[in-house]
Amino acid sequence: AVLAAAGASMGDVLKVTIYLADMRDFAAVNEVYEAFFSPPYPARACVQVGALPKGARVEIEAVAAKP
């Protein structure tokens, strides 16, 4: 919804940072990532954090640029 409001789409995403409460969730997150993006995939970083707001297990930050 944020991308659409800016006139962009998932294809305009250049980099994604994924914050996980538990790195054991990486395989599941990776499956979802591949469902939302297609090759060539955006650059990606994934890190485990001590805690996320409201007890969330995952938070995703995306950087996009509209040509």
Image (spheres, rainbow, N blue to C red):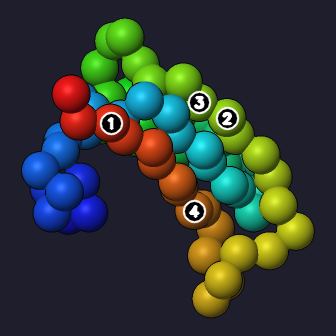
Q: Which residue is mark 2?
A: 45
Give the vertical position of 22 relative to 43 (above or below): below
Residue 20: image location, x then y, percent: 70, 56
Alpha carbon distance from label 1 to label 3: 15 Å
Element marked by disc 1? loop
Element marked by disc 4? strand
Q: Which residue is mark 4?
A: 59
Residue 38: image location, x then y, percent: 29, 20
Q: Would you say the residues marked 2 and 3 are in contact, meaning their CB atoms lie under 8 Å apart?
A: yes
Alpha carbon distance from label 2 to label 3: 4 Å
Alpha carbon distance from label 1 to label 4: 20 Å
Nearer the observer, 37 or 7: 7
**At label 4, which amino acid type do we have?**
Glu
Residue 1: image location, x then y, percent: 20, 64
* Left or right of 27 on screen, residue 9: left
Alpha carbon distance from label 2 to label 4: 12 Å
Q: Which mark is residue 44?
A: 3
Q: Which residue is rendered at x = 18% and y = 41% of the image?
A: 9
Q: Which residue is mark 1?
A: 65
| Quadrant holding the C terminus | top left
